[in-house]
Amino acid sequence: MTPSTPPVLVLHPGDSVAVARVALSVGMTIVAEGQPLTVLDPITEGHKIAVRALDAGQPVIKYGQPIGLAAGAIQAGQHVHVHNVTMADATTTQNNTGHLYVPTERAEAPATFDGYVRPDGRVGTRNFIGVISSVNCSASVCKAIAQHFTADVLNAAFPGVDGVVPITHGSGCGMSNTGEGFELLQRTLLGYARHPNFAAVLLVGLGCEVNQVAALAEALTDEQPGRVHTLSIQDAGGTWEAIEQGRRMVQELAAQAATARRTAVPAHHLAVGLQCGGSDGYSGISVNPALGAAVDLLVRHGGTAILSETPEIFGAEHLLTARAASAEVAAKLMERLQWWQNYTQAHGASMNNNPSPGNKAGGITTILEKSLGAVAKGGGSGLMDVYGYAEPVRSLGLVFMDTPGYDPVSATGQIAGGANLVCFTTGRGSTFGAKPVPSIKLASNTAMYRRMAQDMDFNAGQIVDGTQSVQEAGKQIFQLMLDVASGQRTASEGLNLGDNEFVPWQLGAVM
């Protein structure tokens, strides 16, 4: 931060709060909106200070939007947070649908990246083998098969194969073989089995489970011959026999995968899942808008960006419906939000339960504030379609996928839908990985970026520091997307993270 950088950020001329760039102590005099302001409470960096007096019940305004109501009178200079702000009565609204939609002007010279072109024309950013369990009962066997193929083993025998990934989960039996829960699990597993970042897959089942391997394999008959193999533990003769058979099968698949080579392809083959986790008071100011600027560039170059985490757009949905390409797209988004309101109420919860303790410690007060910052990841491009969880994403441009806000579950749905890259923004810090897809970690503030340097790929905190603009950061993030898609390793890949983040959304009765 330069000596001339103001100590607070006022984000919109109509805001009643500013965000502290640095810790503010009682008695300090700062300047906000050109006027001197005396600090009345100690205020941590990333937290809000009132820039004008508010009466009880008056809206608290940030980003030019209400984020809550003053629980009592608030003086200018006081700390504004959970102790004196209540949740406003936010309801899903659909005003001015599509009035801000503008078709994207395509780039004259589309960007490219070096990817793996699969026989069906889809493009991978990595070259893995997948070992996929149909049921929790086969999870240990899947892990034992994959663990045999260490980096040393692969580099010696199969250079060019990025790894063998166990895709395991806690479901697959004790459930009905019909209905939403079963369909969701199968759709997610099939999405991973088809994923272009897997050169080939081995499906492993116990043999007697509800979610039968044979049914999964039958749904994959359109795949390239020899790409999908199956294994039953009971038919193999038990655990050790299945592990031995599985290792031999994967060795054959690895030999096949090792022949793949990267080639230059247009950026329209890039599908990026947008995630935020461990958000803080800076996330909606720096890293999320910067990612949004990168998304707008990606869309201009023909690519796809998948915005998700439905509970975390609550209260900001009007910013997306305003950019919807059609009334039908806006209606699909509103239907999913209404489903979530009914779902949370049925379980005795509230949509405002979403901000985590870490979010609040970082300065986020309500779900409305969190949502307004989260939506910024989608940039200003038109919203082209809305998808259910793990549905194949076929539209180009900015789309929305209905997922929970819990990051591993949300990213699992995006990857199953076809995302071959994930961009993950964080303010508090994150140790997320998402095999078989590389995950780019983007920090909202410089202090955390430095503290967790081995986990971060980009520091958007320079925007808060006043040394970089949102657009400049967006250009750098877009180039980082292309570089990582071409094989540059991310921080999480360097730490070998991502084997445990396959977490399908579980709905329905467990029996």
Image: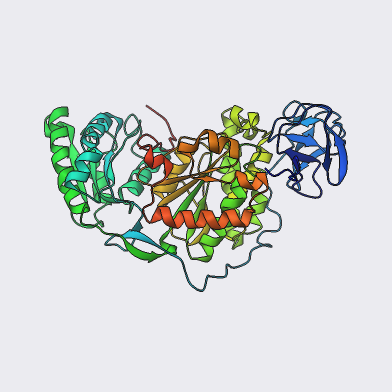
Q: Residue furthest bottom?
A: 108
Residue situated furthest front in the rendering: 3
Instruction: Please tell me in which quadrant of the rendered image residue 49 appears.
Output: top right
The image shows residue 94, relative to residue 502, as above or below, that is below
Q: Is residue 10 above or below residue 395?
A: above
Camera-nearest residue between 44 and 59: 44
Pick the quarter of the image with the N terminus: top right
**Residue 257 is at least partly visible in this image:** yes
| Model colouring | rainbow
Compare residues 243 and 110 and report the one nearer the observer.
Answer: 110
Q: Which one is nearer the viewer's eye here, 168 or 215? A: 168
In the picture, measured across the screen, residue 491 lies left or right of residue 223, that is right
Q: Is residue 488 above or below residue 173?
A: below
| Screen quadrant of the C terminus | top left
Q: Position of residue 303 (x, y in %)?
A: 47, 61
| Residue 388: x %, y % from top left | 48, 48
Please determine whether, in this image, residue 431 is positioned above or below residue 424. above
Residue at image position (69%, 34%) is: 45
Q: Residue at x 59, y 40 (%)?
A: 446
Task: Pinpoint residue 51: horizontal percent, then vertical percent.
Answer: 83, 39
User: How many numbered discs sit on the rendered protein?
Assistant: 0
| Residue 356 at least partly seen | no
* Residue 32 located left or right of residue 504: right
Looking at the image, which residue is at 64% across and 32% down?
362
Give coordinates of residue 311: x percent, y percent: 58, 40
